[in-house]
Amino acid sequence: MARRKPSLRYHSEEEPLVNLTPLIDVVFVILITFIVVAPLLELDRIELADASGSHASTSVQESSPIVIHVNRDNTISFNKKRSTMAQLPALLKDAKKRFPQARPQIFHDRRAHFGVYQGIKNAAEEAGFEQMDIVLKP
């Protein structure tokens, strides 16, 4: 009599495993990078005057020897003389030499583009000004 050996069949169907360790490592590295870099970012802050009470209708007059007007059609006037964005850095550098303690005043029409303000701000910083007054025209 022949004996049959019992067949040993294992149903070892392994579920595929996904290794998430490298993904988690990458996420932690990115998170740590943001935590380290965030305090180093320079943000421009503009403090607005309090509009409550009678101070809301206060008129602002030109009191600086450096006055820049931005009109609604995005044209620029530097000390009441028409100027272009390309001429502005040289004019501001010259004004910084003549009036080292002065703060430029920018009278910006609210319908003018923000990019014009940004260009003026960059030119003023390049000329060495650390502060400037911004007046928004109604």
Image (cartoon, grey):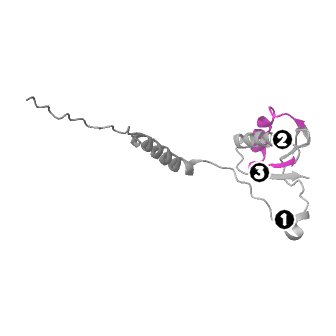
User: Under tag 1, what secondary structure?
Assistant: loop
With 127 as the anchor, is 30 left or right in this view?
left
Disc on the earlier residue, 1 or 2: 1
Between 50 and 124, which is closer to the camera in this rendering? 50
Label annotation for residue 113: 2
**Proximity of marks 1 and 2: CB atoms separated by less than 8 Å:** no
- Span shown in magenta: 82-109
Q: Which residue is mark 1?
A: 51
Task: Quote the CA–CA distance across marks 1 and 3.
Answer: 20 Å
Q: Position of residue 80 (x, y in %)?
A: 91, 42
Disc on the earlier residue, 2 or 3: 2
Residue drawn at the location 77% of the way across and 35% of the way down? 90
Q: Residue furthest bottom?
A: 53
Label annotation for residue 132: 3
**On screen, residue 19 above or below 53:** above
Query: Three-letter amino acid code at disc 1?
Result: Ala
Task: Quote the CA–CA distance across marks 1 and 2.
Answer: 24 Å
User: Under tag 3, what secondary structure?
Assistant: loop
Crowd band around label 2 with a 10 angstrom C-alpha radius: few (<14), some (14–19), many (20+): some
Magenta stretch: includes residue 30? no
Q: Nearer the viewer, mark 2 or mark 3?
A: 2
With 136 as the anchor, is 17 left or right in this view?
left
Between 58 and 15, which is closer to the camera in this rendering? 15
